[in-house]
Image (cartoon, helix red, strand yellow):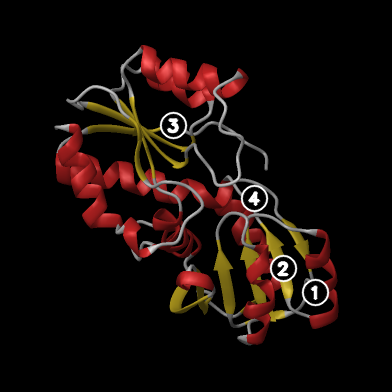
Amino acid sequence: MKRDALVDYLEELLEPARFHDYCPNGLQVEGRAEIRRLVTGVTASQALLAAALDRGADAVLVHHGYFWKGEDGRITGIRKKRLATLLGHDINLLAYHLPLDGHPELGNNAQLAAQLGWRPEGRFGEQDIGWLGSPSGEENLAGLTAQVTRQLGRMPLVIGDPERPVRRVAWCSGGAQGYFEEAIARGVDVYLSGEISEPTVHLARESGVAYIAAGHHATERGGVRALAAHLRERCGLDCEFVDIDNPV
């Protein structure tokens, strides 16, 4: 598949122009014009680039790419090594941040709902990134925590009463602890995100609404994994999701 045709397809599918993001979405580093093999992953780390090289990939597609707002733009150290790997082997880098959080089917939050069996019932937060819904059955926080642990393969950090009944949930992947207050105002029993900050603990304790920090990486594997499967089926590309372990 031609690189430009893939970029055009992803523009139509993920609609990055709808989002006010912290980084450029789409083609971030230009490589060869023909793409036959694509590797997807959460972050464009050196380990993912090495895995792409091992697999003979023509392109790497990630959720966390490069060129973030406010970042030092000098090409030195780690940044030089990463870019040298891509440019030296003519590998394309594509990145989709908020568009891959918010997509209604392939996005991280949609995939979290599918993985956990939660029923989406609405959106909230800036640019409607956060999701509202209900669990698959009436259960308490302890049962919900066990489900999250099983499905995401890691023990989350949980603030709240294990016996609290859970009938309404809110969630947003990654570093979305800043939406917790709005989730509380929406009347949920539990809010799940990837990360947690110091004030989050006090908000959970004082509001009585439970908070689950399930891991930034763990909550954002679903989008790039689903997108790899989608491109394999729709575009005939040889696509593989590569999970570079990250405990955060």
Q: Which residue is rendered at x = 40% and y = 20% of the image?
A: 86
Quarter-of-image position of residue 121? bottom left
Label 2 to label 4: alpha-carbon separation? 12 Å
Q: Earlier in the sequence, mark 1 or mark 3?
A: 1
Label 1 to label 3: alpha-carbon separation? 36 Å
Q: Which residue is mark 1?
A: 203
Label 3 to label 4: alpha-carbon separation? 18 Å
Residue 171 against residue 6 in the figure, above or below: below
Q: Name the one closer to the observer, 173 or 5.
A: 5
Quadrant (top left/top right/bottom left/bottom right) for the N terminus: top left
Q: Name the one closer to the observer, 244 or 142.
A: 244
Q: Which residue is mark 3?
A: 242
Q: Earlier in the sequence, mark 1 or mark 4?
A: 1
Label 3 to label 2: alpha-carbon separation? 29 Å
Q: Which residue is rendered at x = 45% and y = 22% of the image?
A: 49
Q: Which residue is rendered at x = 57% and y = 68% of the image?
A: 171
Q: Which residue is mark 2?
A: 211
Q: Nearer the viewer, mark 1 or mark 4?
A: 1
Residue 15 place in picture, x, y as percent: 29, 59
Label 1 to label 4: alpha-carbon separation? 19 Å
Q: Earlier in the sequence, mark 3 or mark 2?
A: 2
Residue 150 place in picture, x, y as percent: 59, 52
Amino acid, disc 2: Tyr
Query: Could you tell whether 73 is left or right of 233 in the image?
Result: right
Q: Earlier in the sequence, mark 3 or mark 4?
A: 4
Q: Earlier in the sequence, mark 2 or mark 1?
A: 1
- Residue 215's disc is 4
CB of mark 1 within 8 Å of CB of mark 4?
Answer: no
